[in-house]
Structures are given as structure tokens and as C-alpha cells.
Amino acid sequence: MKYGQLLTGLLIGALIGFGLTLYFFEGAQLIVISPAKSVNSTATNQKWSWPDSLDAINAAPANHQVVYEDSSVRVLAVLLNGKQSEPIHTHKWKSIMWIAKPIVPCQINNYLKNEYGKLVKKDSLLIKEMPVNAGQLLDPEGPTSIKNLGSDSGVAYRVEFKKGFVN
């Protein structure tokens, strides 16, 4: 199977699943978790200032596996086992996140550089519910990490747009 076919199948499957969810659960409420806005966002035309060593596949390779990559797009499988934390990492491109198996409860930690150039925790967000089988558009993210507070593993897919994304 070619990666292009896999990517197409994943996206079509997500769209069909989302459509069926809307059809069968028309009155249900979908909880959408808004991501924290990054100070150094390429979406706002600011220069990306974080080193490549903090990129998700470099800083947290056990949690971010490349499913497909070319000059325009990178697709990551994002995995986090129960009671585990992922290392601090960044995502420098706008992306779409599709959560296949949610990590709940979890804690999302955001970091910034202090006056000595060290990363320190800026804020945390406790997540008790996550949308499942729904795509979510995300801006680039500065240093972040997720701690899985539950015992079940989580799985998500992140489609990162290297050459920009027009919504």
C-alpha cells in the first residue's frame, strides 16, 4: 500500500465517520478543545524561533511517528500510553489533528523561555473530555507536553501543512 493511498483512506474515513456521527447524533453536542495560541506562530507571520531539536519527531520520537512526509505535508501518528508523559516538543506548522482514541483525563502543559533561556512551565490545562473522530484545525504550537493521567493509551493523527494552509 502506498502512503498516498493510506493518507487518502484516513482522510476519507474521518470524513465519513464525522458525517455518520452528525447523521446519527444530530442533537448531540460536540466538545471542541481550543488549542493554546503560540507566541511564536508561523500562522501570524512571526518568525519561528524554536530549534529543530524541539520538533516533535526529534524531541519526542516515541510519541510522534511519521506516517507520510513530502515537501508539502507531514502526517504523524501521535501515541501516548497510560500514565505516561511525552517530552517537551513543538509543532511549527498549521495542522489538522484527528483523535482516534482520546487521552482522558490528560494535562496539557505549555512552556516558555525564562530570562536565562531555560524552558519553564507557562500554564497547564486539565482535559476531561475530547472529541473523537473529528478533525480540529490547530495553529503552530510552541513548546508543549501532554501527560496522560488515565490508564488507557491514546492515538491521534496530525496532518501538518508545511507550505501553509488556507481556511
Image: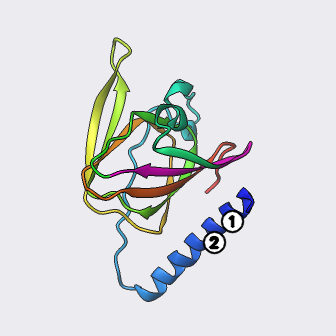
Image-based side of 128 in relation to 4, left or right: left
Report crowding for label 1: few under 14, some 14 to 19, many 20 or more residues within 10 A (C-alpha).
few
Q: Residue at x 52, y 25 (%)?
A: 53
- Where is the C terminus found, in terms of image quarters? bottom right
Give the vertical position of 6 relative to 91 (above or below).
Answer: below
The amino acid marked with disc number 2 is Ile
- 70 and 131: which one is in front? 70
Residues under numbered marks 2 and 1 in contact, where contact means CB atoms less than 8 Å apart: yes
Q: Residues within 10 Å of mark 2 (few under 14, many from 20)?
A: few
> Which segment is the magenta one?
68-81
Q: Residue furthest top?
A: 116
The reply, left or right, for residue 10 in relation to residue 129 is: right
Q: Which mark is residue 159?
A: none
Judge whether 96 appears above or below 10 on screen: above
Q: Amino acid at mark 1?
A: Thr
In front of the other: 70 or 30 = 70
Q: Secondary structure at mark 2?
A: helix
Give the residue number, with chain letter if any, for mark 1: 8
Residue for point 37% across, 39% down = 145
Q: Residue at x 38, y 40 (%)?
A: 86
x then y, percent, for residue 121: 29, 30
Residue designated by label 2: 12
Q: Is residue 2 magenta?
A: no
